[in-house]
Image (cartoon, rainbow, N blue to C red):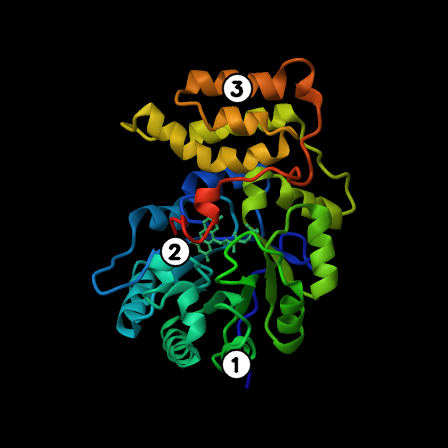
Amino acid sequence: MNTTLPLPETMIPGQPWSALAPMQDVTTLPFMRLLGHYGPPDLLFTEYFRVHGHSSLESHIVDSIALHDTGRPVFAQLIGESLPDLKRTVGAIHAANLPVAGIDLNMGCPAPKVYRKNVGGGLLRDPAAVDRILGCLREAVRGRFTVKMRIGFEDDRNFKTILKLIEKHQVDLLSLHARTVKEAYRSAVHYEYIQQAASTLTIPVLANGNVTSLKKGLWVLENTGAAGLMIGRSCIRNPWIFRQLREHYAQEPIFQPTLADVREYIERLFIATLQPGRAERFHINHLKKFLNFIGLGVDLEGKFLHEARRVSTKAELDIVCDRHLIKDGRAQQAFADEPLKGLVARPNCETAQGCSL
Ligand SMILES: Cc1cc2nc3c(=O)[nH]c(=O)nc-3n(C[C@H](O)[C@H](O)[C@H](O)COP(=O)(O)O)c2cc1C
């Protein structure tokens, strides 16, 4: 008997789900709140809680669950492989009465220091371990238990077996980033695996990987039959993307951000990420995680990106933002729908080698 729980309803009943992809150091409390301001996704996922012998619930992730104020359900993500510690962590989340819509297991992280410990994407090499872990979590989690994974470690040899395990353990939702672990973040996305998962499984499948715009999202939904879209990097660049999806389904005019809107977004990001006592240059460095993606929509030559990467004070950032987003008639120019070709966000967080995950 299938006893999986339905997902929380979408904001517009009947439309495909939209979800914020979990992103370490990005899907933090301030960013979730900003998405609440610009138009939240239907579902949110936290950064991962690390689970090991002496782990405890990291307070900044707990805060993102308890205080995000978007009005939308949030799933807490875990990364780990030790059964007693996974069980203990789920117990701690339940005991703290954290308002989670479910608990999600990370089976996709491509950082070598992670997968070498056989956690994250490393698990995809070992279906027997996946079987044990899914069984343990299914038993421990009260409510929805969800999985986010890639199509395999270096190839798809375990893909079908793992889909069967997802079914066997009555996982409630699969989010599928359709690349292998070895492909990290920049290869083509193999959407045919999402189509395969969506047509094989009875539970909802969220399509993940390079959903860069409303138009691309609609293409992905049509070509995969997925129940919804999970969006990561492109909602850092375009925090209006979830609103645009809703507007499309409600047959309303689609909001088209201008460079002035982007200027305001950067200002809001700056304010939202202020932390008492943090030196200005560290704050600006943190903002660069976001600016790297925002810059992909600003100018074809990548001048904004180039200059934004070199600022170390708020005053310097303001000058760069005003030069590229406001002055000489730029304020009213449209912000590009798609990342501009030839620009690269941030090699050191998007390659498996330099990945800080
Ligand atoms: C900076 C960054 C941090 C990430 N952190 C996580 C994470 O904590 N857990 C996870 O499952 N995936 C993580 N991912 C992967 C994303 O959730 C997503 O699967 C991937 O970026 C592909 O989706 P996209 O093309 O929409 O960005 C991270 C990705 C990035 C770029």
Residue denoted by label 1: 161
User: Residue at the left extreme?
Assistant: 54
* Disc 1, SS: helix
Estimate the spatial distance between the alpha carbons at disc 2 and disc 1, rounded to whole Å: 25 Å
Q: Residues within 10 Å of mark 2 (few under 14, many from 20)?
A: many
Q: Which sits in the foreground, 350 or 233?
A: 350
Q: Which corner quadrant of the image does residue 90 belong to? A: bottom left
Q: Is residue 272 above or below residue 212?
A: above
* N-terminal-most mark, 2 or 1: 2
**Secondary structure under the numbered disc 2 in the rendered image:** strand
Q: Which residue position is annotated with label 2?
A: 48
| Residue at 35%, 68% in the rendered image | 118
Find out whether the residues at labels 2 and 1 contact each other: C-beta distance under 8 Å: no
Q: Residues within 10 Å of mark 3 (few under 14, many from 20)?
A: many
Seen in the image, is 44 located left or right of residue 16? left
Which quadrant would the N terminus be assigned to in this image?
bottom right
Label 2 C-beta lies within 8 Å of the nearest ligand 1 atom: yes
Q: Which residue is mark 3?
A: 320
| Real-space CA distance between mark 3 and mark 1, rounded to the nearest whole angstrom | 51 Å
Q: Position of residue 242 (x, y in %)?
A: 62, 46
Q: Amino acid at mark 3?
A: Val
Farthest residue, direction top: 328
Q: Is residue 163 left or right of residue 47?
A: right
Residue 340 position within the rendered picture, expressed as x and y whole percent measured from the top left: 66, 37
- Mark closer to the observer (2, 1): 1
Which amino acid type is marked by label 1? Answer: Thr
